[in-house]
């Protein structure tokens, strides 16, 4: 697209949240990151992201959360323009529905939507691998959020494979406090590392295991209370997503979901969702 005339185009996206059904840490890497294996699914809550571009060179973020350079959408646009070797004026307007600092990938999903929007609006026709590389430079969660449905993530987050997975009824509970991903991984590294086996996928769907959960519970003891609340009120399976602090429970049907919502302490933030 030419950068010489006056024009303005925009695109509207639903940036879906994700849950890490499980999160297995297979080791520490030389770059300080961790080697992961995680089954991830899109869930039904989303942020709304409107990306508008025109000629010029400025990145503007309109959001009640992180409205400046710290926003991952800002980073995504900057890296995108560097990749195509050309600047534009871009405004990213975000309406937040996904709680942040929760392990639900809200900021990363907004950034993934920004990358897709810029590629579409500018008709840059970047290869899938280029979009992936841009996403990876923005953050480890971003490449997988270029996809929908169930996927298996490996490595630092750059290996993404779409997989078949179940449709589930979920209740999410979010503690008052947010958790910082880097801090949770750091605490994980402070404890002795015990190499654990990698169960078969079928076993992983039966019993989710999140290797960051114990340290997250130490940082935020409310996580344990919320997991117990979900189990006590009918969840068949419970776990924590990502590095926390949000937890989720799987319920058999809508009736069980509604029963749980009524019984779980009213002071907790509850989100009813489905996956994928
Ligand atoms: O890549 P991103 O900036 O989103 O990662 C945030 C933090 O999460 C990193 O600084 C790192 O501490 C931790 N992390 C990790 N291993 C991964 C992904 C994230 O240690 N595979």
Image: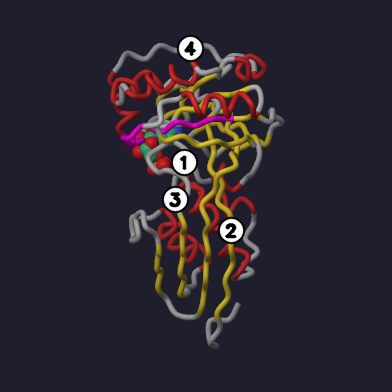
Q: Which residue is mark 1?
A: 140
Callouts 2 and 1 close, C-beta under 8 Å: no
How many neighbours does mark 4 have within 10 angstroms: few (below 14), some (14-19), or many (20 or more)? few
Q: Specify the segment rendered in magenta.
A: 170-182
Compared with 200, 116 (above or below) is: below
Asked if residue 178 lies in the magenta stretch, the reply is: yes
Callouts 1 and 3 close, C-beta under 8 Å: no
* Distance between the alpha carbons at the discs numbered 3 and 2: 18 Å
| Residue closest to the far bottom | 5
Q: Position of residue 220 (x, y in %)?
A: 30, 26
| 54 horizontally vs 125: left or right | left
Asked if residue 263 lies in the magenta stretch, the reply is: no
Compared with 167, 224 (above or below) is: above
* Residue pictured at 44% horizontal, 19% vertical: 229
Q: Position of residue 246 (x, y in %)?
A: 43, 32
Of residues 73 and 85, which is closer to you in this image?
73
* Distance between the alpha carbons at the discs numbered 1 and 4: 22 Å
Residue 13 marker: 2
Q: Is residue 64 visible?
A: yes
Q: Position of residue 222 (x, y in %)?
A: 33, 24
Tell whether circle 3 marks a residue whose Cβ is less than 8 angstroms from ligand 1: yes
Q: Earlier in the sequence, mark 3 or mark 4?
A: 3
The quarter of the rendered structure image containing the N terminus is bottom right
Tell whether circle 1 marks a residue whose Cβ is less than 8 angstroms from ligand 1: yes
Q: Which residue is mark 4?
A: 196
Q: Position of residue 215 (x, y in %)?
A: 34, 21
């Amino acid at each position: 697209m030419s950068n010489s005339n006056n024009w303005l185009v925009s695109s509207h996206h639903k940036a879906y949240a994700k849950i890490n059904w499980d999160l297995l840490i297979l080791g520490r890497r030389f770059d300080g990151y961790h080697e992961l294996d995680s089954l991830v699914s899109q869930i039904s809550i989303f942020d709304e992201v409107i990306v508008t571009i025109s000629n010029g060179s400025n990145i503007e973020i309109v959001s009640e959360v992180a409205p400046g350079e710290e926003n991952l959408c800002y980073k995504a646009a900057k890296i995108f323009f560097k990749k195509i070797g050309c600047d534009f004026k871009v405004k990213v307007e975000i309406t937040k529905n996904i709680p942040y600092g929760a392990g639900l990938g809200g900021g990363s999903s907004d950034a993934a939507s920004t990358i897709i929007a810029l590629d579409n609006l500018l008709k840059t026709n970047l290869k899938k691998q280029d979009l992936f590389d841009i996403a990876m430079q923005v953050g480890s969660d971003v490449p997988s959020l270029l996809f929908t449905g169930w996927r298996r993530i490996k490595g630092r987050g750059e290996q993404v494979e779409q997989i078949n997975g179940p449709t589930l009824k979920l209740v999410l509970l979010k503690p008052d406090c947010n958790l910082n991903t880097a801090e949770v991984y750091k605490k994980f590294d402070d404890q002795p590392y015990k190499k654990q086996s990698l169960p078969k996928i079928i076993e992983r769907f039966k019993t989710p295991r999140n290797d960051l959960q114990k340290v997250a519970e130490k940082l935020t003891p409310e996580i344990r209370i919320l997991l117990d609340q979900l189990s006590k009120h009918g969840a068949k399976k419970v776990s924590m997503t990502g590095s926390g602090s949000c937890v989720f429970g799987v319920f058999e049907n809508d009736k069980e979901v509604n029963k749980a919502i009524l019984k779980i302490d009213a002071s907790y933030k509850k989100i009813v969702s489905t996956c994928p």
